[in-house]
């Protein structure tokens, strides 16, 4: 049985988190946590918290062999966009899209 966790409406663009999610997919959980711990990205911190939450869900669900758990799925979907306006010269304005993302992680035994 796969144990899942997600962080919805994360205040980071999905294009910044997707490469990090690709790195940890199909890795053992503790190796993935070590990988994320030493990455300088802000998205790695968010993904690390979601992975720890999925591991806690597995522990709470009574899973055995937490050391042998593997990251089965790690994907990032696009959330809603906040539209903002940046004032420009001579009274004009440019639009800014502040993107959000939904981060999902699933772990399971080998």
Image (spheres, grey):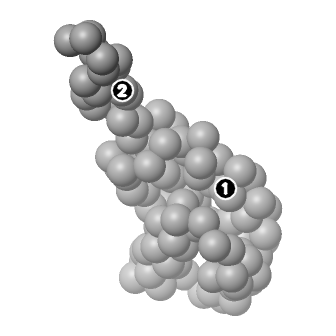
Mark toward the viewer: 2 or 1: 2
Do callouts 2 and 1 mark residues in contact (Cβ within 8 Å)?
no
What's the residue at 73%, 77% (across, down)?
A: 35
What's the residue at 51%, 52% (across, down)?
A: 104
What's the residue at 50%, 78% (across, down)?
A: 52
Q: Is residue 84 above or below residue 50?
A: above
**On the picture, is 62 further left or further right than 7?**
right
Q: Residue furthest left?
A: 91
Q: Nearer the viewer, residue 74 or 65?
A: 74
In the rendered image, the quadrant that contains the N terminus is bottom right
Instruction: State how many labels appear.
Output: 2
Q: Which residue, given by chain and number where applicable, does mark 2 sit on?
A: 96
Does any portion of residue 56 appear in the rendered image? yes
Q: Residue furthest front?
A: 90
What's the residue at 28%, 27% (across, down)?
A: 86
Q: CA distance from mark 2 to mark 1?
A: 26 Å
Q: Nearer the viewer, residue 33 or 85?
A: 85
The location of residue 66, given as percent across then percent down, is: 63, 86
In the rendered image, the quadrant that contains the C terminus is bottom right
Q: Which residue, given by chain and number where applicable, does mark 1 sit on?
A: 21
Q: Is residue 4 above or below residue 29?
A: above
Does any portion of residue 69 appear in the rendered image? no
Residue 110: which disc? none
**On the picture, is 84 further left or further right than 15?**
left
Q: Nearer the viewer, residue 61 or 106?
A: 106
Q: SS of the residue at dot 1?
A: helix
Q: Is residue 52 above or below residue 27?
A: below
Q: SS of the residue at dot 2?
A: strand
């Amino acid at each position: 049985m796969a144990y899942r966790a997600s962080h919805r409406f994360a205040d980071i663009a999905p294009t910044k988190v997707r490469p990090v999610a690709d790195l940890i997919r199909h890795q053992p959980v503790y190796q993935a946590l070590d990988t994320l711990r030493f990455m300088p990205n802000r998205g790695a911190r968010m993904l690390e918290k979601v992975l720890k939450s999925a591991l806690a869900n597995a522990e709470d669900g009574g899973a055995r062999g937490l050391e042998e758990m593997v990251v089965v799925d790690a994907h990032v979907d696009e959330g809603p966009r906040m539209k903002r306006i940046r004032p420009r010269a001579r009274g004009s304005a440019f639009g800014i899209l502040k993107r959000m993302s939904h981060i999902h992680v699933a772990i399971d035994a080998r």
